[in-house]
Image (spheres, rainbow, N blue to C red):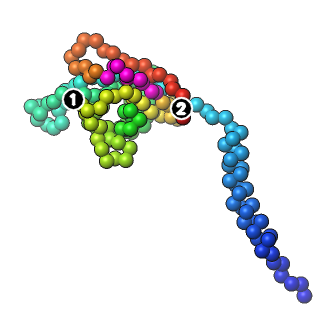
């Protein structure tokens, strides 16, 4: 009668090491030898201005608030729009921004990443506006807008519209 085959403690240790470090090593090799594909650039236009909003049904409750306005100058719609201020405060809008449409977001709707603090309107300068959206191909596109020296909030009634084009920065 044949005795059942068993593993020695050394064979078992080697098997466990291979089961753990084999996939980890393959993942590291894969990440090292594959080239990074840059995110597509989103041709969004951004401006800062003030506009009148009416929060309720009553027209007498109107108030002027500072806003970030995003314009889609392309011929395709953008989905899952997300806007970031100074890489700290974000507002996501899962709606679609159609070709040629403009979306205005009051600064008071921007919330910190952890969800605990709203954007301190009037106390903080807007230095960078980042716009993320899903383009027609399904890829996530990014547009960064340097607002240094341009963060003066203009009233909606001002005649000149100053749109800021995206500036491509090296991603970390």
Front-lying residue, 50 or 123: 123
Q: Secondary structure at mark 2?
A: loop
**Is the N terminus in the top left, top right, bottom left or bottom right quadrant?**
bottom right
The vertical placement of 30 against 171, above or below, is below
Residue identifier under label 1: 65
Mark 1: give few (<14), some (14-19) or many (20+) Cα within 10 Å. Answer: some
Residue identifier under label 2: 171
Could you tell me if the residues under marks 1 and 2 are in contact, i.e. CB atoms within 8 Å?
no
Task: Pinpoint residue 123: horizontal percent, then vertical percent.
Answer: 26, 32
Give the spatial CA distance, label 1 vs label 2.
32 Å
Q: Is residue 4 left or right of residue 94?
A: right
> Which corner quadrant of the image does residue 160 belong to?
top left
The magenta segment: 143-151
Q: Residue at x 79, y 71 (%)?
A: 10
Q: Residue furthest left?
A: 60
Task: Reply yes or no: does residue 154 show up in magenta.
Answer: no
Q: Residue at x 34, y 47 (%)?
A: 115
Q: Residue at x 69, y 60 (%)?
A: 20
Task: Pinpoint residue 28: horizontal percent, then vertical percent.
Answer: 68, 47
**Is the C terminus in the top left, top right, bottom left or bottom right quadrant?**
top right
Q: Residue 167: which numbered mark, if any? A: none
Front-lying residue, 34 or 75: 34
The vertical placement of 142 against 6, above or below, is above
Q: Is residue 129 left or right of residue 139?
A: left
Q: Is residue 120 left or right of residue 22?
A: left
């Amino acid at each position: 009668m044949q005795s059942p085959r068993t593993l020695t403690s050394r064979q078992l240790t080697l098997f466990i090491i291979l089961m753990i470090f084999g996939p980890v090593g393959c993942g590291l090799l894969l990440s090292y030898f594959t080239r990074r594909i840059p995110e597509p650039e989103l041709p969004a236009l951004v401006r800062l201005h003030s506009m009148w909003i009416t929060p309720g049904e009553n027209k007498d409750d109107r108030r002027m608030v500072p806003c970030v306005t995003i314009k889609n100058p392309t011929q395709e719609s953008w989905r899952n729009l997300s806007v970031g201020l100074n890489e700290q405060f974000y507002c996501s809008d899962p709606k679609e921004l159609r070709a040629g449409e403009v979306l205005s977001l009051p600064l008071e709707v921007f919330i910190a990443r952890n969800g605990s603090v709203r954007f301190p309107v009037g106390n903080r300068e807007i230095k960078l506006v980042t716009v993320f959206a899903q383009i027609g191909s399904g890829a996530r596109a990014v547009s960064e807008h340097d607002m240094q020296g341009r963060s003066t909030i203009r009233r909606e009634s001002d005649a000149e519209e100053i749109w800021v084009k995206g500036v491509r920065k090296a991603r970390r």
